[in-house]
Every structure is written in C-alpha cells, then in structure tokens.
C-alpha cells in the first residue's frame, strides 16, 4: 500500500464485504441449527440397514458437521476483514490529520507515484524549517508502513486460513486479525529456533519452544506454518539432535525434566499440522514417510521412523498420513525382522542409543510403539492398518498352519503378526523394569480399530455402527484369544482395552451364545451395522480370560448390565414395531435374554474365581474396585444408553431405546451393580472358591430380575409381578451353562478350578 492508495481509499467495498459476511453468519447459523437438529438427529434415529447403517449415516453426520465448520471459518474471515477495515480506516484518519497539522505549519504533501514528498510553502516557511519537514515526512512514512503491514498481514492470514483445507471448511477459529497474524509470526519465529544446530540451542531457546508449542499446539495456522517452515528433514534432525545427551550438556542438566513436555507439545503441534491440506504440508507428510528408513542426525544413530514415531504418541494425526506411514513402516519391519523370523534388530535398544522418548516408559527405539499410540487416537486408520496384509502365502517366511493334515504356509495380516507372532524388542523403563508400553499401545490401537472411537473413551451417539472391517477384526481378535488365552493372560495389562472392546460387542456375543443359525436371534439381539460372526466356544474362552483381570471383568460386567436394561426395555416396550419384535411370548423373551446374560456373567465369574484362587492370587477387592471405577466412565453414558456401543442403540428403534425409560431401566440396574461393589462381601470373603461362585451367582440373579421388573413396571405391563420369577429360573440355567462350558474347556483354559 502506498501513500496515495491510503489517502484516497474508498472503504465502501470493504464495508459491503464485512456486511455481507455478517449477513452470511446469520444464514449459516440457521443452516447449522437445521443441519444439527433436523438432518443429523433424524439420521441418528433413522431406519438404516445394510451399507446405509455404516456409510450413509456417517456421511450425513459429517455433512451436518460441515455446516458448523463453515460457520466457524466464515466467522474468522469476517473478524479478520472487520478488524482490517477498522484499522485501515484508523490509519487513513491518522494520515489526514497529520497532513492537516502540516498545513498549519506551512507544509505541503505531494503524491509522487508510489511515494510522496513534504515541502515548505514557497511563500511562507515552516516555524522550525527543515526539522518540521523531516518530522512530518517520518510520521507519514510510519503511517503508510503501518497500513501496509496491516494489509499484508490480513492477506497472509486469510490465505493461510482458506488454504488449510482443499475441500470443505476449516474449524480454525480466530477472534480478530491479530490472533491469526500472531500465530503465523510465532510459528516462523519458533521454526527458526528449531533450525539451530543442537549444540547452539540455549536454555532460553528451549523454554521459548516449549512455551510456544504448548500455547499454540492446537492452532491450525500455527501448526501448519511451523511444520512447513521447519521442514520434514529438519523436524527429524531437531528431535534427534535434541535427544543426543552429549550435544548440549547445559540443557540436559537444566531442562531434563522438561524434555517429555516438549516432546508432547511438539507431537501435538505436528498432529494438528497433518490435518492441513496445503501443498507445503502435503510435501512435508510425503517427505516424512520417505525419510522413515533413512539415517537421521550427524551420527546416524537413529532412523526417521524411530524419531517421528516418538512424536506421534499424542494428538490426532491425519488418517491418510498414518496409512502411508504405516505401510512404509511395515516394509521396514519386514526387512529388519526377515519377514518376521526374528526381533527387528534395527529397533532393538542396546542402552547406548539416543534416547528418543523421554516419558520414562521406554527408550523409543522401537518405532512401532509410538505409531500404535497414534493409531489409538485415529480409529479409521487403525482399522485399515490391522486389516492390511503383512505377508502372503507366497512370500519367504516361516508362518504355517494345519491344513488337511499338513503344515502349510499361511498369510498374515498386520493384526496376526503384531498380536500373535511378533518378537518384540526388549525395552526397559527409566527405572530399569521391563517395559509394557509396546503391547499396551497395541491393545489401545485395537480398541480404536474395533470400536470406531479413540481408545480410552466411551462411545457416543455420534459413533457409527460397527463396519464390516471392524467386525472382521473383532472376529480375528476373539478367535486369536480363544486359540491361545496366554496372549492376554501373559500380558494382563492389555486386558482393559480388550475388555472395553468386548463390552461394545455384547449384542454380537449374546448372539454367539444362542447357537442359533435359523431362528430369530437377530430379532432378540438386534444389531445395526455389520454383526461380528463369533463362535460360542471362542466367546466363552474370551470371557473366562477377561474375567481374570479386574478392569476387563468390570468393563464387560457393567456393560452387560447396561445392555440388559436396554434390551429388556426394547422387548417390553409397546412401541416397538411388530415386525421387529422377537416372535415369542413375553415370558420366553425374558427367559431367553436372562439365560444368555447369566451365561456371560457366569463365564466372567469362572475367570474371576481362577484369578483369586489360582496361581495369580489376585485380591477379591481388586474386582470390586474395578466395578466401582466404572461408575465414572459411565456417568455420561447411562442416560443415552450408548455405553455398550452403538451396535445396539442404533437399531431402527434407537430413538425409543434411548428414551428416558430405557435410561431409567439401565440406570437402576447399574446402580445395583455399583452399590454391590461398594458393600461387596467379597472384600472379606478370603480365598474360598465356593463363596466366590455363589456370590456371583446370586448377584447375577438379582440383576436379571431387577432389569425385568423395572422394564415391566416402566411400561405398566399386566404381568409385572411374574417377570422376576421368569428371569430367575432362566438365570439359573444360564449360570449352569457357563459352569458346564468352562468345565469342558478347563484343560484348554488352563484353569485350576472346577466351577459350581
């Protein structure tokens, strides 16, 4: 912007633009409300079937969300434009005021092309002569420069905001131009610091980076600008160099405790950056993948995958980036493990390597550990990764299976390899203990991959029903644990995630326990999306295995209680359409539901009994505490009825099931479970197997009776005084089923007890 442009500027066009954007906000607010309250809510309760239940429903949800992003982006644009207009008007006023003051001092300002001149009037001199001329010239020059900076900064901010996405709208929100401009400037400043040679990085530089990345980690413009200004190679060089202890003894001495925080803040920033669709960010992501198997740093102590994976333990990374990264990482894994024949030696920590992870859980040498943490936050990418192929039958490897009496080579997915076959590199914590981080992250990534939501969270009404790929992965997981329960019992810290997975597949598990291929089990246990096809015996082994871990046991036990309440309400609800009803009498319906529910509880009880009485010798109190701890997790899910996964709640009558009545039935049943955990007689029961078994049995009977009673009472059914007897008799059968099944499998399950 030059002098003449500012002086003669007509801001009507800018006024009209700001006004148009303001009017647009009003329209977008209305569209957002219509999309959320109308389109989206209808989609959540619509009668979806087949692919529509998985694809169309999710598409409608994402489309409705775009209206919210459009409003956010439009608001940011309006704010930047409005702020810029007001500031430019202010600079124009300052310019004209300065010129008028100059006239009073006999000074004349003349525009000359892109510049201007200040001179004294020929007939009358300025009071202070040339000094007044120079002062006015400098003042005007400062005003023009300020206006130019405002205009340039606004242009940069608007371009950065709009360029964040190729398609759709960004959810980046900025209250004014200065906020967006500050993000850009701070990103460029911190990127320059990170480009320094590791030995030149001062304590002040370290503090500035840590504070800046923490403040702006979730700012889309900042994140994109920081990552692209730093560049892919220098991103890896920065973390690799910073993690070499002899490069900067001052930092290692003064800031060692802050390294983990910087690692997290940098990782969160890069995660946000990968969500941007700018050409520069696309090159960054592509370069990171290509540098994965290349040496990093001047001493070549690490490879790109090892460095980057340690920055991926936090944040939501772009799914496509994770897919490309995972594909290339598996290629490197196959190379270094000789197609799975040995520990991938390139990932083995020997205690002398650069310490790339500063959280204390492991050294960071195995890149699979950090990558799996990233997958645990990105469900779609996790599902794709675990279902992808590791080796085919035709490749050179030693994985075999029994086929028609002969050992034949088998193909493996990434799930098969990581969960069943991988020789994990030995890792230690900063206390010298064996690290559990790798396999624990594997379990969390599987939780995301099978459930459709990030690990450690409960499903919501927004979580789509299980897809075909998720269901097939669940099938492989259940079959794998059934084939070798030691895959969990040897690594019990994985069980909490597998327990949560199981709790969200309870409709599928109840179906499997019905052993019904021709009847109406699909109506007794309705499922939206793709059901997981599970074997009864596999499910029993899984439940007994999970029952041995307090957290896993609690997740399934509490989940089944909530599901039981929903299911009883669903079938006793007069509003359930006739064509969707289980075509049996109310008594048979309650008996069939109670029997399967009791079998699940009984199978868990077998596992719990083994854990307490068997070699593990766990405390009964741990199991009671595990149930009590589930209360916090369920606090926000009970009323919506979605805590056991949308595979049930998203049925064609999902709206009715999620009603206040369903929430009330489940709430009463759950409160019964929680109260039992708080006053649990097992806390003083000691190690007597009979006491443990009978307590679990009685508790299950009460739970099933209570669920039936509450549902019948809520709908004012004439047989409400009979349902408790129906539920009890069938519950006893179900618990006996669990006992008999477990007894027949005792050798396979390696239990030392005989239930019952």
Image (cartoon, helix red, strand yellow):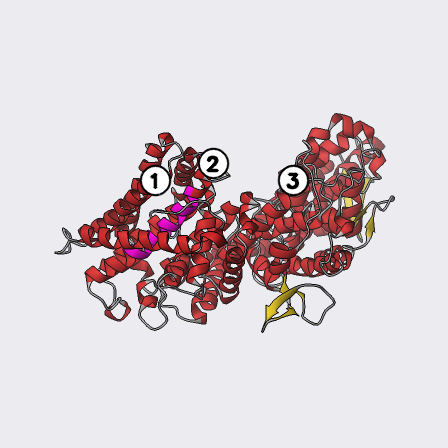
Instruction: Please tell me which of labels 1 and 2 falls first in the chain.
Output: 2
SS for tag 2?
loop
Where on the picture, by quarter, is residue 165?
bottom right
SS for tag 1?
helix
- Closest to the observer: 234 or 618? 618
Q: Is residue 257 magenta?
A: no
CB within 8 Å, label 3 to label 1? no
Q: Is residue 608 magenta?
A: yes
**Which numbered disc covers residue 435?**
3
- Closest to the observer: 505 or 570? 505
Instruction: Please tell me which of labels 3 and 2 falls first in the chain.
Output: 3
SS for tag 3?
loop
- Closest to the observer: 608 or 359? 608
Q: Residues within 10 Å of mark 2 (few under 14, many from 20)?
A: some
Q: Label 1: which residue?
A: 690
Image coordinates of residue 712 in percent, x first then y, are 19, 53
Image coordinates of residue 317 in percent, x first then y, are 62, 52
CB within 8 Å, label 1 to label 2? no
At x 50%, y 57%, the residue is 482
Instruction: Please tell me which of labels 3 and 1 falls first in the chain.
Output: 3
Q: Which residues are magenta?
A: 594-609
Q: Label 2: which residue?
A: 618
- Left or right, 559 with respect to 470, comes to left
| Disc 3 from disc 1: Cα separation | 37 Å
As drawn, 241 above or below 511: above
- Left or right, 430 with respect to 716, comes to right
As drawn, 673 above or below 517: above
- Majority secondary structure of magenta residues: helix
- Left or right, 591 with respect to 42, comes to left
């Amino acid at each position: 912007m030059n002098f003449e442009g500012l002086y003669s500027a007509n801001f009507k066009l800018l006024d009209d633009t700001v006004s148009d954007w303001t009017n647009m906000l009003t329209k977008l607010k209305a569209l957002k409300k219509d999309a959320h309250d109308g389109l989206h809510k209808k989609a959540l309760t619509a009668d979806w079937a087949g692919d529509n239940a998985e694809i169309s429903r999710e598409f409608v949800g994402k489309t409705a969300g775009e209206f919210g992003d459009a409003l956010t982006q439009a608001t940011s644009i309006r704010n930047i434009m409005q702020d810029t207009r007001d500031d430019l008007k202010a600079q124009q006023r300052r310019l004209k005021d300065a010129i008028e003051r100059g006239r009073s001092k006999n000074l004349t300002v003349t525009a000359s092309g892109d510049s201007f001149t200040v001179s004294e009037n020929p007939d009358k001199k300025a009071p202070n002569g040339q000094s007044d001329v120079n002062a006015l010239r400098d003042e005007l020059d400062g005003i023009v420069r300020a206006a130019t900076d405002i205009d340039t900064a606004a242009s940069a901010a608007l371009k950065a905001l709009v360029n964040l996405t190729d398609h759709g709208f960004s959810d980046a929100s900025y209250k004014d131009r200065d906020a967006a401009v500050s993000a850009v400037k701070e990103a460029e400043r911190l990127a320059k610091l990170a480009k320094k040679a590791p030995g030149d990085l001062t304590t002040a530089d370290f503090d500035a980076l840590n504070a800046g990345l923490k403040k702006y980690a979730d700012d889309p413009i900042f994140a994109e600008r920081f990552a692209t200004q730093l560049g892919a190679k220098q991103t890896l060089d920065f973390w690799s160099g910073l993690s070499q202890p002899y490069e900067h003894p001052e930092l290692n001495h003064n800031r060692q405790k802050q390294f983990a925080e910087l690692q997290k803040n940098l990782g969160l920033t890069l995660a946000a950056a990968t969500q941007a669709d700018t050409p520069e960010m696309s090159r960054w992501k592509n370069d990171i993948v290509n540098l994965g198997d290349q040496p990093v740093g001047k001493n070549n102590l690490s490879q790109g995958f090892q460095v980057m994976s340690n920055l991926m333990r936090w944040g939501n990374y772009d799914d496509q980036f994770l897919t490309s990264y995972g594909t290339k990482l598996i290629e490197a894994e196959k190379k270094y493990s000789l197609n799975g024949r040995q520990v991938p030696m390139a990932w083995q920590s020997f205690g002398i390597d650069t310490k790339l992870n500063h959280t204390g859980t492991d050294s960071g040498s195995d890149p699979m550990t950090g990558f799996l943490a990233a997958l645990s936050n990105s469900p779609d990418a996790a599902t794709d990764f675990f279902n992808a192929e590791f080796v085919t039958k035709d490749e050179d490897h030693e994985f075999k299976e029994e086929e028609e009496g002969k050992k034949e080579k088998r193909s493996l997915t990434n799930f098969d390899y990581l969960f069943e076959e991988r020789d994990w590199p030995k890792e230690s914590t900063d206390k010298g203990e064996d690290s559990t981080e790798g396999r624990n992250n594997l379990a969390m990534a599987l939780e995301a991959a099978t459930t459709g939501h990030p690990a450690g969270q409960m499903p919501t009404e927004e979580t789509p029903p299980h897809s075909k790929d998720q269901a097939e992965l669940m099938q492989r997981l259940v079959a794998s644990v059934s084939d070798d329960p030691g895959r969990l019992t040897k690594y019990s810290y994985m069980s909490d995630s597998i327990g949560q997975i199981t709790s969200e597949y309870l409709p599928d598990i109840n179906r499997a326990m019905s052993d019904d291929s021709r009847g109406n089990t699909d109506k007794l246990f309705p499922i939206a999306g793709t059901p997981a096809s599970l074997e009864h015996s596999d499910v029993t082994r899984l439940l007994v295995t999970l029952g041995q871990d307090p957290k896993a046991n609690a997740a399934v036990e509490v989940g089944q209680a909530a599901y039981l309440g929903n299911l009883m309400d669903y079938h006793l609800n007069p509003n359930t359409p006739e064509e969707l009803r289980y075509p049996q009498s109310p008594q048979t319906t309650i008996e069939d539901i109670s029997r399967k529910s009791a079998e699940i509880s009984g199978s868990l009880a077998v596992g719990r009994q083994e854990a307490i009485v068997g070699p593990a010798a766990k405390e009964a109190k741990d199991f009671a505490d595990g149930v009590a701890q589930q209360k916090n997790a369920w606090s926000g899910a009970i009323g919506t009825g979605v805590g056991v996964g949308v595979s049930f709640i998203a049925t064609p009558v999902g709206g009715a099931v999620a009603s206040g009545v369903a929430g009330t039935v489940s709430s009463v049943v759950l409160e019964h479970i929680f109260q039992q955990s708080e006053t649990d007689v097992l806390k003083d029961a000691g190690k007597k197997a009979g006491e443990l078994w009978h307590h679990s049995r009685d508790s299950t009977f009460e739970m099933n009776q209570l669920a039936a009673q509450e549902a019948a009472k809520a709908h004012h059914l004439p047989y409400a005084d009979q349902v408790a007897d129906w539920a009890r008799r069938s519950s006893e059968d179900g618990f006996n089923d669990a006992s008999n099944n477990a007894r027949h499998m005792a050798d396979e399950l390696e239990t030392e007890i005989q239930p019952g």
